[in-house]
Image (tube, rainbow, N blue to C red):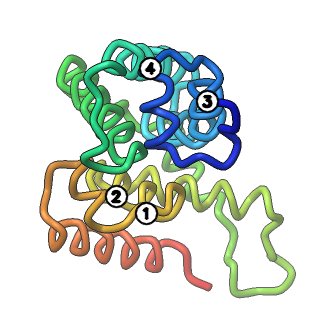
Amino acid sequence: MNDTADAGDETLMLAWAAGDAVAFERLYARHRARLYRFLLRQLRDPSLADELFQDIWQRVIAARRDWRPEARFSTWLYRIAHNRLADHWRAQRHRPPAPEDADERAARITDPDTPEHALSEFEQRRRLQLALDALPPEQREVLLLRLEQDLSLEEIGAITGVGRETVKSRLRYAMDKLRARLPE
């Protein structure tokens, strides 16, 4: 394939399966940052995120010849990521515990209603991350797939293995919890 810059993910995947290494480089470049960010937010451990990130791409490489464009490439990629995360949590039998100083951190959050306590951009991101961390894993996952990966409800359902209405419900509950924890 000579011009892969504007090719769709599915076209790139098929070209790569046929032996075009440049097609894989473009595909990887398109998805590496968002996939890594998704894993890092789920795992909250850079070294573990690195490990799973590499494992997911190895699985993509191993499956390239059998891949068929029955769904969008990104849906397939995040389904692999979802399954790999599920395997990890099953092996761990629990989510990582909250930091020991979680209560102290929460107590240090200043009152956002007073101008003299306006939070800096860094503090706002920290509050958002704490609120995301407090969400149940299923709600956090669909929220991140929707907001950061811009996937449709159907694509998220295909990735997570649940129906469209369940995805909508999880998104609604996640947003309600974020609004409650992050008043304007």
Q: Nearer the viewer, residue 121 or 105?
A: 121
- Rounded to the nearest angstrom, the CA distance separating label 4 from label 2 is 33 Å
Q: Element at badge 3?
A: loop
The residue at 66%/49% (across/down) is 6
Q: Amino acid at mark 2?
A: Val
If you read the primary sequence from the N terminus, does the residue marked by circle 4 or circle 2 appear first? 4
Give yes or no for contact between labels 1 and 2 (Cβ–Cβ under 8 Å): yes
Residue beneath label 1, please?
146
Q: CA distance from mark 2 to mark 3?
A: 35 Å
In three-dimensional space, the C-alpha distance between marks 3 and 4, rounded to whole angstroms, equals: 10 Å
Q: Residues within 10 Å of mark 3 (few under 14, many from 20)?
A: some
User: Which quadrant, please, contains the N terminus?
Assistant: top right
Q: Secondary structure at mark 1?
A: helix
Q: CA distance from mark 1 to mark 4?
A: 32 Å
Tell me the tag on residue 18.
4
Please state which of the two labelled residues, at mark 1 or mark 3, is closer to the viewer. 3
Q: Position of residue 81 (x, y in %)?
A: 35, 33
Q: Is residue 184 above or below residue 125?
A: below
* Mark before the other along the chain sequence, 2 or 3: 3
Q: Which mark is residue 142?
A: 2
Task: Judge left or right: residue 48 versus residue 27.
Answer: left
Rendered residue at 81%/76% (across/down): 118
Q: Amino acid at mark 4?
A: Ala
CA gap between label 1 and label 2 equals 6 Å
Left or right, residue 65 beside residue 10:
left
Q: Is residue 173 above or below residue 96?
A: below
Quadrant including the C terminus: bottom right
Q: Are marks 1 and 3 in contact (CB under 8 Å)?
A: no
SS at circle 4 = loop
Q: Which mark is on residue 1?
A: 3
